[in-house]
Each structure stands twice: as structure tokens, then as C-alpha cells.
Image: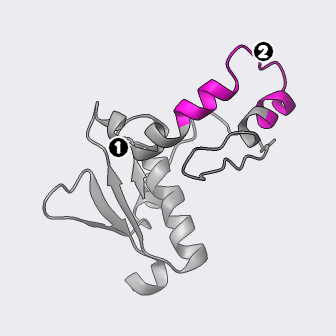
Amino acid sequence: MLADAGGSNGCRPRLWKYRLQALADRYGLVVNVCHYPTGASKWNPVEHRLFGPISVNWAGIPLRTPGVMLSCLRGTSTRGGLRVSAQWQPRAYPKGVKVTRAQMDRVHVLSNDLCPRWKYSVVPADIWE
């Protein structure tokens, strides 16, 4: 998984790694994560391939409702055949969620020797033990 180094999915937030552990446990998969260095997210291939066509597709359209936004997103495709799939997630995502030390103790992270802050794997609990 490629991710930015900042924001909610950055290399430092505890909640990001805690939720990755839940994902790894649920599907029994090792989740390999590599963060772009700070300021380097411009190298993210998704941004180059997708965000340009999305911006062109909804240019000049007031995004006043989720339906309008979803319609614009779903109508986007690239010359290479990449098509946007979008769905509305009406769930609430509360701010300020704190992950305790005890919760972090249950997160099983294997750090890479080369860039341990930016490259690591989250291992399912049943494999870790």
C-alpha cells in the first residue's frame, strides 16, 4: 500500500496503524505499507493518472450535493481505460479519536531496515503469535 507521509494516513498517527491492524486481522493478510517521504506525494501515480481527469470532468459544475459529486466521479475515465468507481459512505468519522498505549501494544509492526518510519508491515495477530 502506498500512502502519503502526512495527514490521517501518515507514518506517525497511531489510529492509522491501529486500523491497519484490524484490516490485517480481519482478512488474515500482511499489510505492507510504504509512505512517500514528506513533500513527495506528487510522485503518487494515482494523482497523475486520476486526479487530472476528475478535475476536467467536474470543472465548472457546482458540487452542492453528494449525488452531483458522485455523478461527476463515476463519469470519469482515462484514455488508458481506467474508470472511476465511487460510492457514498454516510458514516460519521469522529475527530480526535485517541489510541491508547494498550491498544498500540496489540499492533504488530515489522519495520524495514532501510526506512523504518516509511516502510513497514502490519502482521495479523494469529501469524504474529
Q: Give, as a single range, the part of the protein colored magenta.
A: 51-71
Taking the magenta stretch, the answer to whether it contains residue 66 is yes
Marked residue nearer the N-terminal end (2 or 1) = 1
Contact between marks 2 and 1 (CB within 8 A): the answer is no
**Quadrant position of the C terminus in the picture:** bottom left
Left or right: residue 124 versus residue 85 is left
Q: Which mark is residue 48?
A: none
Circle 2 — which element? loop
Which residue is pictured at 21% across the width and 57% down the height?
Answer: 116
Q: Is residue 62 above or below residue 75?
A: above
Amino acid at the residue labelled 2: Pro
Q: Nearer the viewer, residue 32 or 54?
A: 54
Q: Is residue 127 above or below residue 12?
A: below
Q: Nearer the viewer, residue 105 or 67?
A: 67
Circle 1 — which element? loop
| Other residues around mark 2 within 10 Å, as few (<14) / some (14–19) / many (≥20) | few
Q: Nearer the viewer, residue 80 or 119?
A: 80
In the picture of the structure, the residue carrying the numbered disc 1 is 12
In the picture of the structure, the residue carrying the numbered disc 2 is 62
Amino acid at the residue labelled 1: Arg
